[in-house]
Image (cartoon, rainbow, N blue to C red):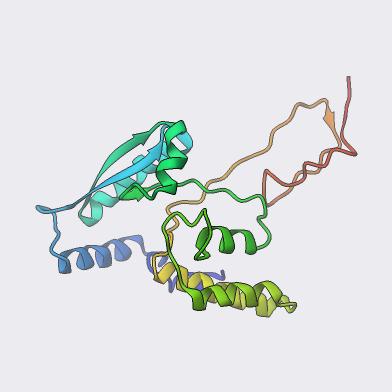
Amino acid sequence: MPPDRLRTLPGYDPDVQNNRREAREIMQQLGYGPDHPLAVKVAARNIPLYRDPAVMLIDQLKEIYIAGELDIVETANWNPKVTRRDYMVGLENTGSAVVDDPDQQLYESYACDSDRNFTGYCNRRLEGLFHQQSRETDQQRRKELVWDIDKTLQEEGARPVIFHTRGATCWHPQVKGPTTMVNSMVNGWRMEDVWLDR
């Protein structure tokens, strides 16, 4: 999404202090404040990839009168817990193998009947736009549709994005010929031209 559109979304104004001030005002209107924070449990899988962002989230929530408590969940219990929607706040670190196309994320994370729609969000009208953008052949028109969909998802708090992770692909110097993708560490794994120089 272009920066000028992104900054109009809740919480995406680059003025972080202003965002937090607005959030505190909302919390105060709801009856919470520094002496009466909202208590929540933040569930996270017990591995650093989930646990560390959950700890950072809890720390930042303190600034807007939300007192988070970390709820560590062992890996074997994580998927059943999330599937049951047995959490107050759950930090799900959902990845995507198809980073260049919105279809996977839209249908998997936000479609009404998706098994991986962990929040239970459902907007049939918006789901109709998922289909429309998927069929759209004009790339610019499709981008506009996806940006409109994303705006609605963010405004409705469908599945708030807590953070964006970054990853890297590493290999030994003797590995020759791999194609490294600039947009994902999970793409580019066809090995027809890869060889070992030993």
Q: Position of residue 60 (x, y in %)?
A: 31, 49
Q: Position of residue 45 (x, y in %)?
A: 42, 37
What residue is drawn where x is 68% and y is 44%?
186
Left or right of 33, for residue 111? right
- Work out whether residue 81 or residue 101 is closer to the camera in this orientation and state it: 81
Q: Find residue 70 and report its image quarter.
A: top left
Left or right of 127, for residue 169? right
Left or right of 36, for residue 117? right
Q: Find residue 73 and report its image quarter.
A: top left
Extreme-top residue of the structure? 198
Q: Position of residue 176 (x, y in %)?
A: 85, 32
Q: Position of residue 142 (x, y in %)?
A: 66, 76
Q: Is residue 82 above or below residue 195?
A: below
What residue is drawn where x is 16% and y is 69%?
29
Count how many numbered circles sit on residues in the image.
0
Q: Locate the N terminus and report the quarter of the image it occupies.
A: bottom right
Extreme-left residue of the structure? 35
- Work out whether residue 149 or residue 78 is closer to the camera in this orientation and state it: 78
Q: Is residue 84 above or below residue 21?
A: above
Residue 4 in view: no
What residue is drawn where x is 34% and y is 40%?
55
Left or right of 47, for residue 104? right
Residue 92 in view: yes
Q: Locate the C terminus and report the quarter of the image it occupies.
A: top right
